[in-house]
Image (tube, rainbow, N blue to C red):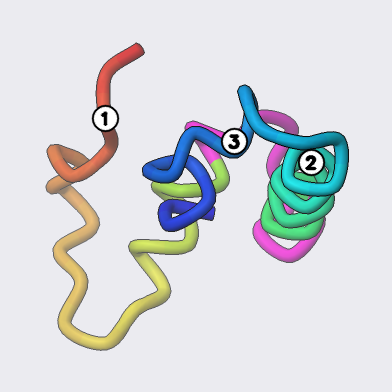
Amino acid sequence: YETLHTLHAENGSPEARQRLADVSYTLCVVTGTRDIDAALIAARHQLPGAHPEDDSLVPSA
């Protein structure tokens, strides 16, 4: 997700936008969330060495 977002896939070709949408959807399903920001926080908390109280890595909108 972060790579696609960094590459501005949301402004790219239809294939790039679909890939970003698919990855976003999958991240939400896997983490049991309904939006990508919550999904990213939840996913980071599952990483080894994560600090659950620290969600500062989530980019602000």
| 3D distance between C-alphas at marks 3 and 2 | 10 Å
Q: Which residue is mark 2?
A: 21
Against 30, residue 34 (above or below) is above
Q: Nearer the viewer, mark 2 or mark 1?
A: 2
| 3D distance between C-alphas at marks 3 and 1 | 11 Å
Q: Secondary structure at mark 2?
A: helix
Going by the numbered disc 2, the residue's amino acid type is Ala
Q: Which residue is mark 3?
A: 36
Going by the numbered disc 3, the residue's amino acid type is Ile
N-term mark: 2 or 1: 2
Against 30, residue 11 (above or below) is above
Looking at this view, is 41 or 23 the one in front?
23
Q: Residues within 10 Å of mark 1 (few under 14, many from 20)?
A: few
Q: Residues within 10 Å of mark 3 (few under 14, many from 20)?
A: some
Q: Which residue is mark 1?
A: 59
Relative image position of residue 1 (x, y in whole percent): 54, 54
